[in-house]
Structure formats: structure tokens, C-alpha cells
Image (cartoon, rainbow, N blue to C red):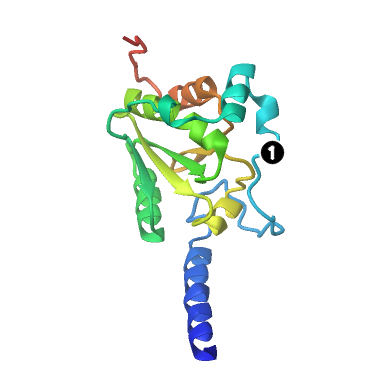
Amino acid sequence: MNARSSSHREAATDQDEDEAALGCMGLSLCSQQRSPARPEIATRGIRDRLQPSAAAAIQKGRGEGDKINMPPTTVTAIQSNERLKNVLRQAKESNSNLVVLEFTAPWSEPCKFMRPALEKIASDFKDHADFYTLDVEQFKTFARNTRVEALPTFLLVRKTILERVIGVSKDELRRSIEKHISGVAIDHCHP
């Protein structure tokens, strides 16, 4: 039993070291200094910043009857360190699309609340920005190094981290994306 536990610990340590080696992956606005360990990424305080209707929706939760039929997703979940490296490498290339990274967690109610709005925004900007989600539990080191302290946090990346948007304000996220897609006209007429 000790040999099995030991090999499990070694495998976990190898994975942690792989992620730690990623650091900020060369993003220049990241602090390469390690911040003190935080017990977990917090969602506290987000409800206080929500509009009353959003806070009520989070408090109420969604039942089976409240499901919204969404078109196929335009937001891609990043599942591996290698994929994350590739996405960030592409974001550094000249003439690259803006990359929008959402740090999320399956247990985060604000993230669940923001999902339909994120899908709509991603669909509207699909020709000018690439949208990805990162599970904060899987990418703890990267989240810590990029100073993610609340969920959802959106990082807008092109060559470097241009801006971060925290919380569930779809209008703020949309304005931030528009600001960093210079000279691009987007049709905002909604049917």
C-alpha cells in the first residue's frame, strides 16, 4: 500500500511541477514572484456587486425547467497545459485574434450565471477573438500567477495581458473586448 501511495504522490508532484514550470508562460503583466498561498479562489463579494436581478437568479438557482437552448458553443475548454501553451503562443503572434480566457469552476454560481452571456459575446466576436475557459482547480498555479482572486475572471490577451474583467457584467466584458479589437466594426443588432 505504501508503494502505491508513494507512486500516486510522485505522479501528482510531476503534474504540479509541469504546471509550475508554465508559470505565467511569458505574459509580461504577470508577477513572476510567488504570492502567498490562498486557500481557494473566492466568489465572495461578487453577489454584492451584481444587479438585483442577477443576484436573485444566483440565489434562486436554475431548475430543470429553466434550461436555455443554446447553439453549439463558441467557447473552448482548455484541458491541458500543452493546449494552454499553444493558445498563449498564438496570442503572441502578430495579427493574432484577441484571446479571452475565462477562469471558471463547476461549483461557481456566478460562472454558471455568466455562461449564456459569454456564449452570446463569443458568437458576436467569433471572427475577431478566440474564447477559452480554464478550470481554476486544474490550473491553480497559472491562476495564482495571473492574480485570479475571484470567479469568473476574464483575461484579455494579445502579446500580453491587456485587461482583466472580474465578475458577471456582460456589458463591461463586451466593452473591454471592443476596446481591444481596434478598427473592427461589430453588428450589435440582436434579432
In this picture, is 83 found above or below 121? below
Point 31% across, 34% down: residue: 74
- Horizontal and vertical percent position of residue 37: 69, 59
Q: Vertical placement of 142 versus 130: above or below? A: below
Between 71 and 189, the residue placed more toward the observer is 71
- Residue drawn at 50 percent across, 23 percent down: 170
Crowd rating for badge 1 (residues with CA inside 10 Å; few <14, some 14–19, many 20+): few
Name the spot of residue 182 as percent of width and height, x first: 40, 23
Residue 128 at least partly seen: yes
Circle 1 — which element? loop
* Image: 87 above or below 82: above
Left or right side of 75 for 179: right
Q: Amino acid at mark 1?
A: Arg
Q: Where 70 falls versus 140 (above or below)? A: above
- Residue placed at 53% from the left, 65% from the top? 20
Can residue 163 be seen at all in this image of the molecule?
no
Q: Residue 55 at what x, y percent from top left?
A: 62, 24
In this rendering, the count of numbered labels is 1
User: Residue 138: horizontal and vertical position, in percent?
Assistant: 49, 57
Q: Residue at x 37, y 20 (%)?
A: 183
Q: Which residue is mark 1?
A: 44
> In which quadrant of the rendered image does the C terminus lie?
top left
